[in-house]
Image (spheres, helix red, strand yellow):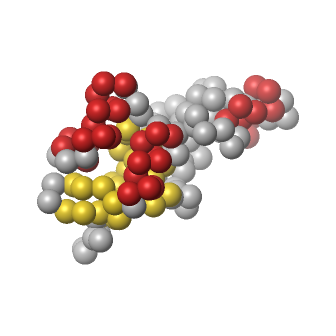
Amino acid sequence: ASWKPKFLEKNQAIQELVTKQNRTFKIVYVNCGKNYTTVGIKVSPDIRHILVSNQYIFIGNSRCKVGDRFDLKQCFRCQKIGHISSHCQETDAICMYCSASHITRGCPHKDERGKHRCTNCSHSTNEAHGDPVTPPVLCVDTTA
């Protein structure tokens, strides 16, 4: 089942930003436990502002707590969020420094900060460090 329509269905302001202004709203992971579900979403800064200000988002008939998430799993093979390298399904390695198709250990640009690029947001680290344009990941707890 797709989670995105469930998020946008009852959150009109966010739905308009996503559908009419093409703002970022991407589900990056879903973790389901016995009594909880946690969903990580990558959003544009204006959507993040709405969610953090409201502290909740509606999913179906449920009001769910929202908060910034910083303790994410990141794969050291493909650099994607939500899993670790021992569970990675990607065939090609992606460098954590320059986002090229090689293992990080062998990166020729490791010490050249101007050539560092985030594979998840495609901004150079010089521009993205602390830059509000870089989409953050939020955590939505559906048990609230």
In the rendered image, residue 98, in percent from the top left (x then y), is placed at 69, 29
Query: Of all residues shown, which one is farthest toward the left?
Result: 61
Q: Residue at x 40, y 30 (%)?
A: 23
Q: Nearer the viewer, residue 100 or 50?
A: 50
Q: Residue at x 30, y 55 (%)?
A: 57
Tell me which corner region of the image, top left, top right, bottom left or bottom right, holds residue 115: top right
Q: Nearer the viewer, residue 95 or 30?
A: 30
Query: From this viewpoint, is residue 20 visible?
Result: yes
Q: Residue at x 19, y 62 (%)?
A: 62
In the rendered image, residue 93, in percent from the top left (x then y), is placed at 57, 35
- Relative to 74, 10 lies left or right: left
- Above or below, comparing residue 54 to residue 103 in the picture: below
Q: Residue at x 33, y 32 (%)?
A: 18
Query: Of all residues shown, which one is farthest toward the right?
Result: 111
- Relative to 78, 18 lies left or right: left
Q: Nearer the viewer, residue 25 or 125?
A: 25
